[in-house]
Image (cartoon, rainbow, N blue to C red):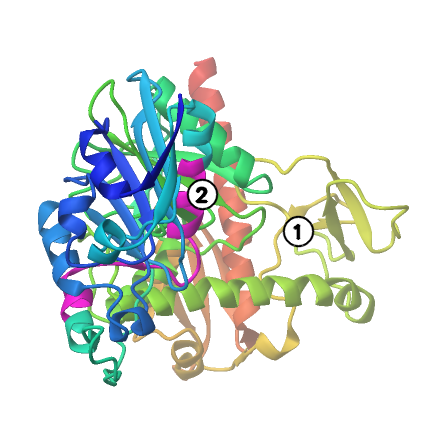
Amino acid sequence: MIDLVSEKVWESLRTVTWPGPVRAAIAYVGREAPELLPLGAGDTLVFDGSDESLAGGTTNPAALQVLFDRGVILVSVARLHAKVIVAGSEEAGERKTLVGSANASERSRTSLREAALLTDDVEVAAQADLQIDRWSGARGSEWVNQEWIDRARGIYRPQAARKPRAVPRAPTSAGLWVVPWIEDETPPSPQVEAVLGLVAQEFVEHSIERYRLGEDGYKDGVRVGDEFLPFTLADDQEVPTGNRRSWPVTTVVRLVRDSTDGSTVAICVTPPSQASVTYAAVRRVAEGQGHDLRTEGPLPASTAASIRALWSSEEESSDAEGEASESGLRSRPLDCPRCGAELRLIFWGMPPGPVDPDVYVMGGCALPAGPVATHSCSACRWEGRRRDWNPDHVRGIASLDDLFAVLEAADLESLADRVTDDLDHDPVGLDVHEDSDGSAIGVEAILGGNGVLLEFPFSNVDFWDTWDGLHDSWELRTDEHERELDEA
């Protein structure tokens, strides 16, 4: 079915039955919009709520308030000029799409000569759905809450008096959620599968994930455009360990109500490459601003901005490390902690051509599970990780006071707690070693019955590399003990 609806478009549409859910993109929203638009709780309206539209009287905050109170999801997109309504679902067996020229206003209803096409073609409906996703997820789109409407009232001027009124704009941004990433083992419904396919066509260079929010997903406040910073939990954990690294940040591009169990599924897209951050680093930023990560809901805007800056700095640091690694190996080769021979940089993946065997050793095509080794000994084949290649970041530690200042700790106990957080294993210990006159000559790092003495002076990189070596030894010994128990 394809029908041309002309002249009095809104009057003609009064007899049309719109199957739910309904999603609309109507540029300008007049006071009559709640009467004209077939929108109810859980439906979506994308509109132009820019300052120019409000000050010019073409979008009416009073109408938005009625729709907002009705439970309609409202998204403002500046310079929008479209008029599209898409309704129903393929699973329900009915879809309708309207594409035309009419705004939701009195003039469009009574004065202007409008026209629109109404169709039940499922492919057109799918394309309209995807286009509304693009608009509502675009950079600069604003998801309307009560504060947004209150501010809009201060800007709005009826069309008879169009002089704009200057009102400071409160900053708005997508919400950032720190979430446990739990694999959704529930088979996706045909409805979810269809949306996944559409999103995959649009975001061809991204990874597509789904995250089941539960029956109260909308009420919990997750919106299209929000970002998830996911951390994996072990089976017995309520919060991640401190050194657990995040999955890449993923953006919600669609919320789908799963008809099989009533839950809400967030469809998310993840860029092809992005730095990860540790849970300990995120927690320190959040706690420094007075926020508990265990509190459900999106992070406060200021905390979210600080954490976004955190992973941005991780990306810059990663780039700088890659650029510095080869020159670092050539100019100041590292010694193996086991035999003293020179270390080589491990190259993971397929190189574009032959590599210098004095600098590189091939690690393989695929990264292994767990912590990834960055260096290999040219003699004894020891493998380990180097935390910092940038000489500007290496700080000397010549005393206990230096140790606490450089590593930002109050005492050995709090420093040991931090190391325990950063390493995913049993608690560690730190002990002071003194000479005959009582002066501190170094500290002993203790893990699983093994200890290594770090004599002053040493660097912050030496400190963390020591724990890397102890942890590797601890893991090997644990694996050997488990094998002995299995054999017994």
Q: What's the residue type where badge 2 is placed?
A: Gln
- Give the secondary structure at mark 2: helix
Name the spot of residue 198 as percent of width and height, x first: 48, 32
| 139 or 323: nearer the viewer | 139
| Residue at 27 percent of width and 43 percent of height | 8
Q: Main secondary structure of the magenta part?
A: helix
- Give the secondary structure at mark 1: loop
| 164 or 172: nearer the viewer | 164
Q: Can you tell which quarter of the image residue 382 is in?
A: top right
- The relative height of residue 412 versus residue 103 in the rendered view (above or below) is below
**Residue 277 can be seen, yes or no:** yes
In this picture, which residue range is highlighted in magenta? 128-150
Name the side, left or right, on which 19 lies relative to 90: left
Other residues around mark 2 within 10 Å, as few (<14) / some (14–19) / many (≥20): some
Name the side, left or right, on which 207 lies relative to 297: right
Residue hosting label 2: 131
Q: Quadrant of the C terminus?
A: top left
| Residue at 26 percent of width and 83 percent of height | 164
Residue hosting label 1: 374
Other residues around mark 1 within 10 Å, as few (<14) / some (14–19) / many (≥20): some
Name the side, left or right, on which 482 lies relative to 98: right
Name the spot of residue 146 as percent of width and height, x first: 14, 62
Q: What's the residue type where badge 1 is placed?
A: Thr
| 151 or 403: nearer the viewer | 151
